[in-house]
Image (spheres, rainbow, N blue to C red):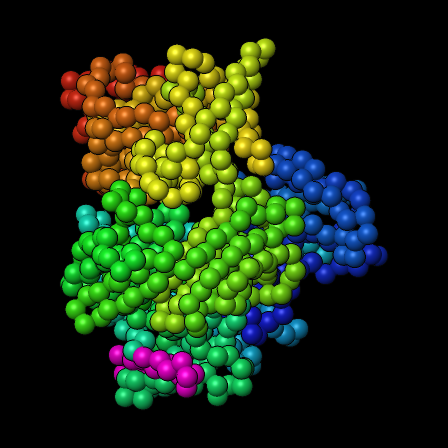
C-alpha cells in the first residue's frame, strides 16, 4: 500500500477501523457477559477472540495440533477480554479446525468463505451452506449489506455506498455460536513508483501477478501484509528485473480483480520559497486526473490536490490554510491517479543539484546532478586549494541520509578516506558541473555520546546564516523519528514525548547500538552530517583479533575464558570505518580526525579466543561487553559458491567488505552445521557467484569470522556441503517449492512442475543446479551424496 493511498485511507477512517482494514480481520464484538467467540481470516492466517476468561493464558490448536502454547494472556482488567494471533509459520485454510483455550475452550471449523471478485460496484464470492448469511461491512461507517448463499454463490451490490479508492471493509460469515470467518476486502487499486521500481497495492487477493512490459512476476517475489502487497525490483547491469519507466504498462492480477496502469511522467520543475509555491509537469493527457501532493519535512507536513492545465500543474501551499511554509530540501511526493484509481507516484526534493559532507565517514555525496556531465569537487583551506577530483553522475533513487530522496538527476560520490586530506570545519567545498556551481562552508558540528537513560541527544553547531539543523534519533534505515532543531548553538533533544511528525511520533528508545545523527542544511540545500559516537566491540575468534571502535580514547580489554583471564590496553588509531557497524575495519586507513577511531588487539599467538569467552572493553566512560559466539567457517569455495561451517545459533553472511559488498543473508545451523549457496545471478548475488579472492564474513552479533574465498577443485564426496546448503534452504515443503521455483527462474527447468516437488524431484534438481557445482563425471556420486544428506536431514 503506497504512502499516498494510506494517507487517503487515514483521512476516511478511524485509527481502529484502519487497523482492521489493513490486517483484514474483523473486530470481535463482545461484552463481559457474551459467550467467548473466535474470528478467523484464512487468507491472512489471523485468529482473534473475545469474551474469554480474564487473566487466563491463551493456547491455540490447529487440526488438533498445538501450535501456540500460552502465547499471551487475557488482560485481567479487560473490556472485550480478547486476543490476537498471527504467525507466518501457521497456515490456516478453509475447513481447518481452530481450537482456543483461555479459561474456556472454543472450537471452530473455518467456513468455506471465498471472495471471487471486488470492485467499487459489487463484491462476489462463494460459500456454504446454501442459505447462510454473508455480511459485508465497511471500515468508515457502521453500515452493513447482506446476501444469502445460493447454489454456493453470493453477491452484494455496493453501489448504494458510492465507493472509491481507499474504501475497505470485511466479509463475514458467522455460525450459530457466534464464531466467524472473516475476509478483508478493499476497492482494488495499486501504485507504480518508477523511481524506486516499486509496485504496491491492495484489494486483489492472494496471490497476485505483476506484469511489466509483458513479463510476469508472482510467487515468493511478492510480499504480503494483510490485504496489501509489495514488490521491489532490482534493475541494473546484467539484471533481468524490470525497470519501470514512464510509458510502461503495469498490470496487477489477483483472484479478486485485474487492473492496468500506464505509468505517466511526473516532474517537479520549479519552486518559489518566498511565494510558497511549487510547479511541475505531467504527460497524462486527461486534465481530469487529479494529482495528489504531499510536502513534508521531519517536523511538519501538508497535502493538497491539484489538476494540470496543458500538462503543467501549480501548487499554492498557502491556499489550503494549513500554515505550512515551504523550505529548501522539503520532501515531495507526487501521485497522479488514472480513471479507475490506480496511480503513478514519484519522490522529489525541493532542491536542485546539491551535496552532503559526512564529517566522520569522510564522504561527499552529490544528488540531482545532470547525467552525462562530469562533476568536479574542490576543497579550499585557508584560501588555498588542497584537493580536487572529478567523477561522473550515476542514476540513483536514494539519498545519503535517507529522508531526502534524489530526484531526476544523478548521484556522485567522492571518498576522502584515502586522502590526501580529510575535510574539517572551515573548509570551503565547491561542486560544479557546467554552469551549475554549489559552494558550502563546512560548519562546526558535533554530536555527543547519547544519554541512553533519558533517550536524549545533544551537541553543538556553529552555522552560517539561514542554515538549520535536523536531528535523527538513529540511523535512517531504522525508520527513526526526526526533529527540527533550529539554527545552531548548543542543542539538545529528548525523544520522550509524543509530539508527532508526519510518519512517526517523537518517542524513541535510544540504545547503545543507536547512531543519532544531525544534518546542518545551508540556504541553498547543501548539507553537512555528523553522528554520535557508537562505542562497539567486534571479535574474530578464528583470527584471535578484537576491535574496539568509536571509544573516547585509550581502551582496556579484558577476556575471560573459563578460569583464564587476559588484560591488555591499546591506543586508538584513526581508521575511517564508515561507521562502527561496518565490517571493513580490517582495512587500516589512517586519517587525521579525532574520530572515528579503532583500537586493534591482535592476539594471534598470544591468546586463543574461543566461543563462549567473555569480552569487556572500557575507556573509563563507556563499557561494552559481549560473549563470543561459537562460529567457524570451514568452506568458502568460489568453485561451488558455497560457504559452510559450524555454529550453535543463526548467523548472517556477508559478501565483500562494508558497503561495497552484498550482505544480509541469514542461515540457521542444523545439528551444529551450516551451509549456504550464493546462487549465481539471483538478485542480489553477482552473476558468477562468489569470485575468488572476495572477502566473506559469518556474523553473529559482535562475532565476525572473516575469510577469503578460494577456487578449489573438489571431489564428489566434498559436494555434500553444497547439497546440504540447498536442502537447508528447503527444510519445509513450502520452502522446497520456493527453492525449486527459484532454480527455475535462473535455469531452464520447464519440465519440472512446481506442484510435484517430491524429494526425488529435488535430487534431480540438485544434479542440474550449477555448471560450476556438478562435473559431468561426478553426477552419479552426487545423486548418492544428495540422497544421503536429504535422508539425514529429513528423518
Q: Nearer the viewer, residue 468 or 154?
A: 468
**Observer able to see residue 745:** no
* Residue 734 rendering spot, x and y as whole percentages: 43, 38
Q: Quadrant of the N terminus?
A: bottom left
Using the rendered view, name the quadrant where residue 193 is placed: bottom left
Judge whether 751 appears above or below 36 on screen. above
Judge whether 284 appears above or below 663 on screen. below
Viewed as shown, does residue 325 lie left or right of 493? Answer: left
* Residue 217 rendering spot, x and y as whole percentages: 31, 53
Q: Which stretch did the figure color magenta?
A: 270-286
Judge whether 515 appears above or below 616 on screen. below
Rendered residue at 29%/52% (across/down):
234
Rendered residue at 79%/53% (across/down):
78
Instruction: Say whether residue 558 is magenta.
Output: no
Q: Nearer the viewer, residue 467 or 107?
A: 467
Rendered residue at 52%/18% (across/down):
567
* Residue 257 rendering spot, x and y as whole percentages: 41, 65
Judge whether 46 appears above or below 320 on screen. above
Using the rendered view, name the quadrant where residue 369 is placed: bottom left
Using the rendered view, name the quadrant where residue 588 is placed: top left
Instruction: Say whether residue 282 is magenta.
Output: yes
* Residue 299 rendering spot, x and y as whole percentages: 53, 68
Viewed as shown, does residue 399 lie left or right of 143? Answer: left
Rendered residue at 24%/69% (across/down):
437
Q: Nearer the viewer, residue 148 or 789?
A: 789
Q: Nearer the viewer, residue 241 or 142?
A: 241
**Observer able to see residue 750:** yes
Amino acid at each position: 500500500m503506497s504512502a499516498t493511498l494510506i494517507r487517503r485511507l487515514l483521512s476516511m477512517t478511524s485509527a481502529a477501523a484502519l487497523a482492521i482494514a489493513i490486517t483484514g480481520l474483523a473486530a470481535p464484538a463482545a461484552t463481559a457477559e457474551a459467550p467467548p467467540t473466535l474470528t478467523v481470516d484464512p487468507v491472512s492466517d489471523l485468529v482473534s477472540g473475545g469474551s474469554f476468561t480474564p487473566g487466563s493464558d491463551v493456547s491455540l490448536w490447529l487440526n488438533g495440533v498445538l501450535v501456540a502454547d500460552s502465547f499471551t494472556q487475557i488482560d485481567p482488567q479487560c473490556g472485550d477480554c480478547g486476543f490476537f494471533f498471527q504467525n507466518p509459520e501457521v497456515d490456516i485454510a478453509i475447513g481447518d479446525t481452530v481450537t482456543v483455550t483461555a479459561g474456556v475452550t472454543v472450537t471452530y471449523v473455518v467456513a468455506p468463505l471465498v471472495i471471487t471478485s471486488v470492485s467499487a460496484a459489487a463484491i462476489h464470492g462463494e460459500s456454504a451452506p446454501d442459505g447462510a448469511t454473508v455480511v459485508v461491512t465497511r471500515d468508515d461507517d457502521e453500515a452493513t449489506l447482506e446476501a444469502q448463499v445460493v447454489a454456493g454463490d453470493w453477491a452484494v451490490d455496493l453501489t448504494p455506498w458510492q465507493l472509491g479508492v481507499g474504501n475497505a471493509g470485511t466479509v463475514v460469515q458467522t455460525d450459530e455460536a457466534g464464531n466467524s470467518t472473516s475476509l478483508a476486502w478493499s476497492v482494488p487499486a495499486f501504485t507504480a513508483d518508477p523511481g524506486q521500481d516499486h509496485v504496491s497495492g491492495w484489494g486483489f487477493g492472494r496471490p497476485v501477478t505483476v506484469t511489466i512490459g509483458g513479463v510476469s512476476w508472482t510467487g515468493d517475489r511478492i510480499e504480503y501484509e494483510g490485504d496489501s502487497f509489495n514488490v521491489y525490483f532490482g534493475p541494473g547491469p546484467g539484471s533481468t528485473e524490470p525497470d519501470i519507466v514512464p510509458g510502461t504498462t503495469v498490470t496487477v492480477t489477483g483472484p479478486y480483480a485485474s487492473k492496468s496502469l500506464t505509468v505517466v511522467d511526473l516532474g517537479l520543475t520549479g519552486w518559489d520559497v518566498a511565494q510558497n509555491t511549487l510547479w511541475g509537469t505531467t504527460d497524462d493527457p486527461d486534465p481530469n486526473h487529479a494529482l495528489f501532493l504531499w510536502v513534508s519535512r521531519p517536523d511538519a507536513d501538508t497535502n493538497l490536490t491539484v489538476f494540470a492545465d496543458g500538462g503543467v500543474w501549480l501548487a499554492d501551499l498557502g491556499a489550503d490554510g494549513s500554515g505550512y511554509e515551504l523550505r529548501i530540501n522539503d520532501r515531495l511526493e507526487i501521485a497522479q491517479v488514472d480513471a479507475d484509481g490506480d496511480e503513478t507516484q514519484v519522490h522529489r526534493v525541493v532542491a536542485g543539484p546539491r551535496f552532503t559532507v559526512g564529517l566522520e565517514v569522510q564522504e561527499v555525496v552529490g544528488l540531482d546532478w545532470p547525467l552525462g556531465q562530469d562533476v568536479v569537487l574542490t576543497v579550499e583551506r585557508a584560501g588555498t586549494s588542497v584537493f580536487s577530483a572529478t567523477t561522473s553522475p550515476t542514476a540513483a533513487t536514494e539519498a545519503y541520509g535517507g529522508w531526502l530522496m534524489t530526484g531526476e538527476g544523478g548521484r556522485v560520490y567522492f571518498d576522502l578516506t584515502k586522502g590526501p586530506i580529510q575535510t574539517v570545519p572551515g573548509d570551503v567545498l565547491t561542486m560544479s558541473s557546467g554552469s551549475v556551481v554549489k559552494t558550502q562552508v563546512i560548519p562546526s558540528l558535533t554530536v555527543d555520546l547519547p544519554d541512553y537513560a533519558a533517550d536524549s541527544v545533544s551537541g553543538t553547531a556553529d552555522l552560517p546564516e539561514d542554515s538549520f539543523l535536523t536531528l535523527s534519533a538513529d540511523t535512517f534505515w531504522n525508520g527513526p523519528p526526526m526533529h527540527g532543531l533550529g539554527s545552531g548553538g548548543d542543542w539538545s533533544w529528548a525523544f520522550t514525548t509524543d509530539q508527532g511528525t508526519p510518519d512517526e511520533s517523537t518517542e524513541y528508545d535510544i540504545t547503545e547500538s543507536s547512531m543519532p545523527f544531525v544534518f546542518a542544511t545551508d540556504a541553498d540545500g547543501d548539507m553537512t552530517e555528523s553522528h554520535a559516537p557508537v562505542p562497539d566491540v567486534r571479535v574474530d575468534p578464528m583470527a584471535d583479533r578484537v576491535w574496539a571502535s568509536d571509544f573516547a580514547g585509550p581502551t582496556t580489554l579484558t577476556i575471560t575464558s573459563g578460569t583464564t583471564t587476559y588484560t591488555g590496553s591499546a591506543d586508538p588509531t584513526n581508521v575511517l570505518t564508515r561507521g562502527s557497524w561496518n565490517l571493513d575495519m580490517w582495512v587500516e586507513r589512517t586519517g587525521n580526525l579525532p574520530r572515528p577511531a579503532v583500537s586493534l588487539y591482535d592476539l594471534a599467538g598470544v591468546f586463543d579466543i574461543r566461543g563462549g569467552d567473555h569480552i569487556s572493553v572500557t575507556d573509563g566512560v563507556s563499557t561494552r561487553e559481549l560473549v563470543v559466539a561459537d562460529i567457524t567457517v570451514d568452506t568458502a569455495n568460489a568453485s561451488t559458491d558455497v560457504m559452510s561451517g559450524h555454529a550453535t545459533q543463526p548467523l548472517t553472511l556477508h559478501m565483500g567488505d562494508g558497503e561495497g559488498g552484498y550482505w544480509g543473508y541469514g542461515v540457521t545451523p542444523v545439528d551444529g552445521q551450516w551451509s549456504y549457496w550464493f546462487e549465481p545471478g539471483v538478485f542480489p548475488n553477482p552473476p558468477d557467484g562468489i569470485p575468488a579472492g572476495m572477502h566473506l564474513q559469518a556474523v553473529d552479533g559482535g562475532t565476525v569470522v572473516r575469510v577469503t574465498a578460494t577456487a578449489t577443485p573438489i571431489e564428489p564426496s566434498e559436494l555434500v556441503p553444497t547439497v546440504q546448503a540447498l536442502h537447508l534452504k528447503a527444510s519445509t515443503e513450502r520452502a522446497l517449492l520456493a527453492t525449486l521455483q527459484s532454480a527455475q527462474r535462473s535455469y531452464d527447468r520447464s519440465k519440472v512442475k512446481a506442484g510435484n516437488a517430491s524429494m526425488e524431484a529435488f535430487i534431480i534438481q540438485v544434479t542440474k543446479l550449477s555448471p560450476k557445482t556438478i562435473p559431468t563425471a561426478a553426477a552419479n556420486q552426487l545423486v548418492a551424496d544428495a540422497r544421503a544428506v536429504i535422508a539425514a536431514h529429513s528423518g
